[in-house]
Image (cartoon, coloured by chain):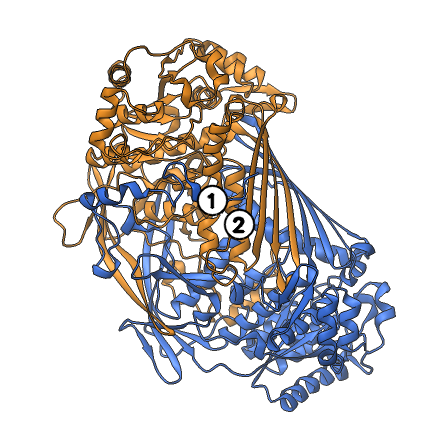
Chain colours: A orange, B blue
Amino acid sequence: MTENIRINNPNVKYTDTHIEAQYCYHTSAVRRDGDTLTVTPSVSELEFRTERRVPRLGVMLVGWGGNNGTTVTAAVLANRLGLTWRTKTGEQKANYYGSLFQSSTVCLGPGPDGKEVNIPFRDLLPMVHPNDIVFDGWDISSMDLGSAMERAEVLDWSLQEKLRPHMSCLRPRASIYIPEFIAANQAGRADNILKGTMAEQVEQIRADIQDFRHSSGVEKVIVLWTANTERFCDLTAGVNDTAKNLLAAIQSGGEVSPSTLFAVASILEGCAYINGSPQNTFVPGAIELAVERNVFIAGDDFKSGQTKIKSVLVDFLISAGIKPTSIVSYNHLGNNDGMNLSAPQQFRSKEISKSNVVDDMVNSNPILYRKGEKPDHCVVIKYVPYVGDSKRAMDEYTSEIMMGGTNTIAMHNTCEDSLLASPIILDLVLLTELCQRVCVRPQGSETFQSFHSVLAILSFMCKAPLIPPGAPLVNAYFRQRACIENIMRACLGLPPQNHMHLEHKLQRGFLPRHDNRIYDNVATKMVLNTSTHTV
Amino acid sequence: MTENIRINNPNVKYTDTHIEAQYCYHTTAVRRDGDTLTVTPSVSELEFRTERHVPRLGVMLVGWGGNNGTTVTAAVLANRLGLTWRTKTGEQKANYYGSLFQSSTVCLGAGPDGKEVNIPFRDLLPMMHPNDIVFDGWDISSMDLGSAMERAEVLDWSLQEKLRPHMSHLRPRASIYIPEFIAANQAGRADNVLKGTMAEQVEQIRADIQDFRHSSGVDKVIVLWTANTERFCDLTAGVNDTAKNLLAAIQSGGEVSPSTLFAVASILEGCAYINGSPQNTFVPGAIELAVERNVFIAGDDFKSGQTKIKSVLVDFLISAGIKPTSIVSYNHLGNNDGMNLSAPQQFRSKEISKSNVVDDMVNSNPILYHNGEKPDHCVVIKYVPYVGDSKRAMDEYTSEIMMGGTNTIAMHNTCEDSLLASPIILDLVLLTELCQRVCVRPQGSETFQSFHSVLAILSFMCKAPLVPPGAPLVNAYFRQRACIENIMRACLGLPPQNHMHLEHKLQRGFLPRHDNRIYDNVATKRVLSNGYHASQQNGVCAHVVKEATIG
């Protein structure tokens, strides 16, 4: 159900190569004088230009043989091949459920019958279809992807049987392994690792990217880390504080984590780099390098299960004037991620990434929280091999309601980890690829500019969003989603979604003919009997 | 922390009496031709006019002596008197937590330091403060509100002690009692009921409203039903299909429910009427009467606990491309609402009101659901006296995720029923009162018009929103909230919230001076070591350890 969208407006021009849209961007500046807040609205006129041609996209995964790597590769293969397989409840078709772009919809407006027209999110703008992604990658384990898929214990067996011939021929490239950054319990998997100096290993990663690009014929490569969580890296002046120092530290073999080495190699190859784990891959020097080279970076840590719901529920409670006072999150999981996180330093990275997710919502409400006040927030993660990839998240939210009352929500959430993360991996790379084809020219400026290298629009998919300095941090799920939707609408010259339905809320309609769907008082009589409820 | 908001823009004019705002309202029309969807954006220029003078408001509750009625009255008294009381964990202050307008905030924009400025929702426009509401009402039980508060078992005892002198002299007026509409188990409470013909009873309700208006000196009265859930009323041609027939049926004593009689009396008195229970009070004749008389009506059924979260979670799941396939909701409660709902006909009303809450979200996603497909949805309500007002809601959401995987969310929610419903009662009447002071003039039109009599903007607070014919039904929580916020912003000439932060997302800033908070590439160097994340990624973060209570 791919839709072709055409915007019928003189402000939107379709050339052979581009969609060019004139857009009014509204902001307001607020100034406080004593008791009075003065709000000054302003409008910036922007021109959005979106390249229409969708390139052949290659995605290289660090940790390709892990549960996420094998699952996302298998899912794309199964969808591309249109596979179906039997389960005890019937025939199952390959799908992309859980992908924002492939499986959720946005409202374009009402059709001639007055009903809202909802289209797949991916159809708003020309985007790569995930079926067309070519995968490659690295792993410290040499296991082929067919066997790795079996080891992951994620996909139905009957599907694995159909996929194995396609997966077994895929073998991860040798990866960078520095034992001190991941848990000691990973040593047993590390049979596929690069040798040589740090600088030589970075050169090999660059050579791998070039090799993949040439041998596969893709036009664009995006690199994404879905490997083990590393411990945090100390920020040290002279080592990783600037791009120059970071490159020098790589030459001299200083403290640089494998994920930062991959990031540097990708940036030097002009490839966007996305960090799906919690560690601080993006040390200041890495960010500076990306900004200098105009390469996109984004992260950190896939927001797939417990944290995703938390960024919904806490936003809901606070936006309803209810005060969360204690949030306690227990997790247990039995996949390799869980085993790696059972080491204290790696858990610490995860804990930090999960800890700040409610801050923006808490800070937005000075009625409920005085300055500096926060709910108690506690996160526990345990490794329980039996549950495998089927992660359990148990949360208790205690909130204060009116007059000292208490609302307690206890939640038990069975999140199949890799099945939730895989569509998010796809969303991350597809949105990154799209952003590489969008540029903006503010009125009065001669030149178009791209998005900031720190691609904050990807916050939606990240537990601990990386944002440009000075930018507001948003974790609230629906605000993040609205951000993506409204920016993609802007590329089409469409104003933000307003959810007002004002044409239905007044006594008489005011829209021109086709839109005029409200009945006046006389007409009301006719439809009354059909009941205004939808009961 | 009341804020005075001033909009600094030539399109917004403040007169002594009004805020007048010129507003561009954007819509799109979509047309399908084969494979192609053509989207035609259009702009309607509207003038919003909001009366600045806030009247003295009286609220009359049907079911004043019930748990909601006593709790909301007590809460307003306690807040007005600034009461504090001891609990075992310390001193507690009166508050309005759970009220959208009193306790939640909206973002106005960025301050000079680049940080977002959030203000109480109520401060966007001149609104009544709940402390200033004068309450009155009816109840089929004659119990004074002090004793009724004790019967409700909702508020802390030490607070009840302080409130009793203020509550005990409040006595509900006699109410309309037609036994067949509510559960038989309510008969024991019915010692304060009107006599006479149906028409006489309606006249008495009208007289009560007039009496309250005159004796209390309020400028405006809004009537709200927070009494027992009634059984559904049959829609019968000649009885309740038109305003004329409905009025005739009242004269002749046809099948008209007590809640519809209250609605008719209110509408005839020009008072907005809000239905906080699930029954179909608003039969077609009642809606027509409201439209004819230009009186606001709104409903149905407070969205306070389980359904509210459902309208968040299901929206979340579907908007994330995840497919809910089964939603099972068990409830038990032990208050009088629970006792009344233990009768099958009354439960049926509740079940209907709760059953459609996910429809708009399901229908919005044809990728996940083919035409007509819906998740299994089952609602059970049981009466368990022991739990009293502390309702338990247990939900299981099963969803299909990628490649046939399953996500199961089981939730146990302890919802103190009346403490969640009371702030919603306040939000309903305050927003209704505000809407009575807003009018809109489309460009080219000579006259201002008011909102439609069916006040759909109140959908946010309702389980089964009543909307004008042809209007889209929205249950999704955040869309409903955005609707209220953006309409109130429109009254100030402010465009909808866009959540884009585009000024922070490009390589170089583009906003005029005060707003220009993005650093260019050179400046970036200086702040790099300050971290790009909120605060935590700056290495190994001693301060984060303190902030988060780590388990």
Q: Please state the horizontal and vertical placement of residue A268, each as a whole percent of the image.
A: 22, 26
Q: Assess disc 1: are there few (<14), some (14-19) or many (≥20) residues with their C-alpha within 10 Å of its C-alpha.
A: many
Relative side of A505 to B234, left or right: left
In this rendering, do the residues under marks 1 and 2 share a single chain?
Answer: yes
Q: Chain of mark 2?
A: A
B185, above or below B506, in the image = below
**Quadrant of residue A180 within the rendered picture:** top left
The amino acid pointed to by label 2 is Val
- Which residue, given by chain and number where applicable, does mark 2 sit on? A314
Find residue A357 and name its label: 1
Relative side of A62 to B274, left or right: left
- Residue B238 visible to the viewer: no
Check the picture and name the quadrant holding the C terminus of chain A. Answer: bottom right
Disc 1 to disc 2: CB gap under 8 Å: yes
Name the residue at 43% across, 67% down: B488
Give the CA distance from mark 1 to mark 2. 9 Å
Relative side of A102 to B189, left or right: left
- Residue B188 visible to the viewer: yes
The amino acid pointed to by label 1 is Val
Find residue A472 and name its label: none
Q: Secondary structure at mark 2?
A: helix
B509, above or below B168, in the image = above
Q: Please state the horizontal and vertical placement of residue B364, each as a whole percent of the image.
A: 50, 46
Of the two numbered discs 1 and 2 on the same chain, state the one appearing first in sequence: 2
Q: Nearer the viewer, residue A368 or B415?
A: A368
